[in-house]
Amino acid sequence: MGYVEPAPIKDKENPFESMMSRFRIAAQHLGLNEETYNVLKSPDKQVIVNIPITMDDGSIRVFEAYRVIHNNVLGPSKGGVRFDPHVNLDEVKALAAWMTWKCAVVDIPFGGAKGGICCNPRQMSSGEIERLTRAYTTSLYNVFGPDTDIPAPDMGTSQREMGWMMDQYSRNSGMTVNGVVTGKPGVLGGSAGRVEATGRGVMVSTLSALEKLKINPYNSTVAVQGFGNVGSHAAQLLTERGTKVIAISDITGAYYNKDGIDIENAINYRLDNRGTLDNFEGAEKMDNTDELLTLEVDVLVPAAMEDVITMRNAEKIKARLIVEGANGPTSAKADDIIAEKEIIVVPDILANAGGVTVSYFEWVQNRLGYKWTKERVNRRSDRIMRNAFEYVYKTAIKYNVTLRIAAYIVAIDRVAKASRFRGGF
Ligand code: GLU
């Protein structure tokens, strides 16, 4: 089977190619035929819109924004919307494909999509962000829909933006359509447990992997990169389960304490400190990338952004287990180095799938017009995460591959089967 190779990667890894290189390996193990390979590698739809917004000072600025639907054979496409100054089409394409594989790994009936607006929300007022969010929703009114494409929060967005998106879509429709977006505030139909769901899934994946490694959580140390929605909840839930989180970080730097960080305190500090850990006390400050990532710990949780574990630092990583809270934190070229060092990686498309799993529950509840308790949400999402981990683990043994390639094998196999059953024109 000779798949056509993409253009060579230059200095920085292109996220889409990074995703594709793992996809190719998994496809080869599965013996995927070339036609299916060609169908699955191409995003179904890529929309680019330019949105003029009146800023608070009266000037008009144009923002470039994207929505990429990678695939929808398993169901309506699902995926977050990212507000970040570095957003670009290649990144959104990769993230959309990752959503397809992520939904398939945990076996929920969604395809994959991702959106993004190239903007810096930290330098915009709440009014400017609201206008931009509403304009984006209106521009993509024909793409979004509870049965077609369902956005959710991602980097730079939260419940607040989801509330605006739901409201704007509903205004345009002339009725309340709460199932069009997930991660909404509870009073608008948001699910109990959604905010902490991704961090909770990271915790469940970490405990499942520690069990396989025969490491007692009570004797284990953890470093978490990123203290946003994913990292802070993962750190808190892991602490509750007995692990010692000795380092955390955010854009202001990393904070280390060999006796363990008081996570509760760090979360409150951040809330009172305009969302950052700047000058956080009770810990020693260190570099957020090289020092934090190469700490002597049992578990490393990169929960900040893409491409932080690369050829440059992979060799120096000392953790025994990496649990990817972020999407794409390990570059494809670093995979081999990490594997050679026998570090186990619970890959992003498995480790951080707790968020989209509870998004699925939110969508189900919206369609039912009914609310589940937090206990029910947690019980069901924990079960899905544990089962997905076990299945990926078994697949890794069966094919003698890493957990990452195994997760791709599981996902691609499901999507390819569905795709074959559905057929083409
Ligand atoms: N943005 C999250 C992710 O990357 C959540 C997506 C969703 O809930 O649809 O998984």
Image (cartoon, rainbow, N blue to C red):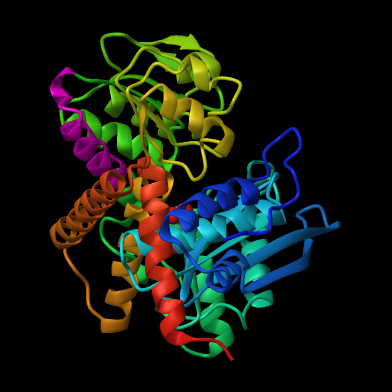
Where residue 88 appears, x then y in whole percent?
Answer: 71, 52
Main secondary structure of the magenta stretch: helix
Compared with residue 209, is residue 424 higher up or lower down, i.e. above or below?
below
Question: As displayed, is residue 39 above or below residue 293?
Answer: below
Q: How many marks?
A: 0
> Is residue 276 shown to the viewer in this render?
no
Towards the viewer: 398 or 324: 398
Q: Position of residue 355 (x, y in %)?
A: 36, 55
- Please state, as top left, top right, bottom left or bottom right, where the C terminus lies in the image: bottom right
x then y, percent, for residue 229? 41, 43
Name, please, the residue furthest toward the right: 59
Q: Residue at x 26, y 83 (%)?
A: 368
Up-down relation of residue 327 to residue 296 (above or below): below
The magenta region covers 200-219
Is 217 positioned to the left or the right of 174 in the image?
left
Q: Residue at x 26, y 9 (%)?
A: 259
Task: Find the residue positioned furthest to the front.
Answer: 1
Q: Quadrant of ligand 1?
A: bottom left
Task: Name the residue: 59% across, 64% down.
Answer: 41
**Magenta-drawn stretch contains 204:** yes
Nearer to the camera, 303 or 307: 307
In x, y percent, where is residue 192?
26, 60
Q: Is residue 403 visible?
A: yes
| Magenta-span inclusion, residue 244 | no
When asked about the image quadrant of residue 14, the answer is: top right
